[in-house]
Image: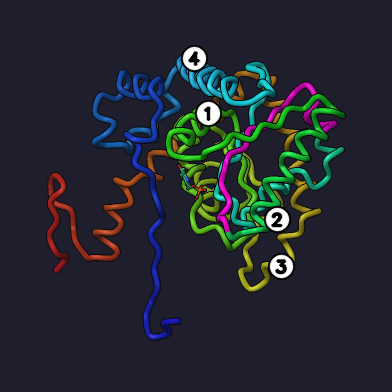
Amino acid sequence: MFPQYEIDYITNGIHLPFWVSKPFRKMFGRKWPNWRANPSVLENAIELDPLDIFDAHIENKFNLISYQKGHSWNLLDEELITIGFARRFATYKRAILIFHDIDRLGKIAKDHIQFIFAGKAHPKDQMGKDYIKKIHQSGEYLYDNYGVKVVMMENYNMDLSHKLVSGVDIWLNTPNRYREASGTSGMKAALNGGLNLSVQDGWWLEGYKKNHLAGWSIGPDDSNPEDPGVSNDWDIDSNALYDILENQVIPTYLNHDEWLYKMQCAISLAAYFNTHRMILDYAEKAYRLKKQNPWKFEPIS
Ligand SMILES: *Cc1c(COP(=O)(O)O)cnc(C)c1O
């Protein structure tokens, strides 16, 4: 669109003090009293005590599930791997990809995994509304045939988002490649020790590259933007997702130490995917300002 200009990019970030959950805030504060002013210290999340991370996460998980129990007839189970998906139901986000081969999913998830969804569709987006209907139908089928629980929470807003991104074990993200601008909810989950299970698009292209132990990458690693159709194949992507659930997510969850190590890796991503770093990038890359101490900027001469 602007051939005469050189186009650069600035990666999105989240405001950590807002999105950090209470037990993680306390844990970070004990370890790094100044972490809010200098969030890059989170790079050293590997130094956090895994048992503290476990306790903090369990507190969040119980908090989410007890909230859920007050709002839905099908009650989630504290013991199971809990996968969250909360989005606007824009169709490109492919909320129902996970149900593509529902019997394969049922067999894998049985006794191991449960799902919690939330989101709204635009009132004029009939397909988005149909997706929500499909989640309800798929949930009934999975429960009747495999005892697998799928719950859909109403009223997705920032309060619920706070509980979800910190309370789930895994944050699922399956957009059509090249359509997801960022996907900041995945950053919120990582900050609170959630493992991202995501197609390589939006922020996860960068996040997974920075630390591939912070989660998992679903399907082809697209590097040819000219050719998006090929690798947004629902069969290929859903099967890749089932393979990861079966061969990586479940065995890792059963190996406690490995899971906690991955949670440390996830938290360390927050050292970069935050608004402090983003503002500094804007100042330098977009506005050509250089930072003087502290938060004072001068033009780059
Ligand atoms: C973070 C957030 C979003 C944006 O997240 P995506 O990953 O882009 O879907 C949307 N709605 C709420 C309530 C949020 O908290």
Look at mark 1 in the image and give the residue it sits on: 263
Residue 114 drawn in magenta = yes
Category of crowding for the residue at label 4, using alpha-carbon neighbours closer than 10 angstroms: few (below 14), some (14–19), many (at least 20)? few
| Disc 3 within 8 angstroms of ligand 1 (CB) | no
Q: CA distance from mark 4 to mark 3?
A: 43 Å
Dot 1 falls on a residue whose secondary structure is helix
The CA span between labels 2 and 1 is: 24 Å
- Identified by mark 3, the residue type is Gly
* Mark 4 vs 1: CB contact within 8 A: no
**Which residue is under mark 3?**
229
- Dot in front, 4 or 1: 4
Horizontal side, residue 132 vs residue 139: left or right: left
Frontmost of labels 2 and 4 is 4
Real-space Cα distance between discs 1 and 3? 33 Å
Nearest to N terminus: mark 3 or mark 2 = 2
Image quadrant for the C terminus? bottom left
Residue 169: horizontal and vertical position, in percent? 59, 28
> What residue did someone put label 2 on?
220
Crowding around mark 3 (Cα neighbors within 10 Å: few <14, some 14 to 19, many 20+) is few
The range drawn in magenta is 106-123
Q: Position of residue 88 (x, y in %)?
A: 55, 50
* Among the 4 quarters of the image, the one containing residue 38: top left
In the rendered view, how is the structure colored?
rainbow
Identify the mark at residue 55; answer none if there is no mark.
4
Closer to the camera in the image, 79 or 273: 79
The amino acid pointed to by label 2 is Pro
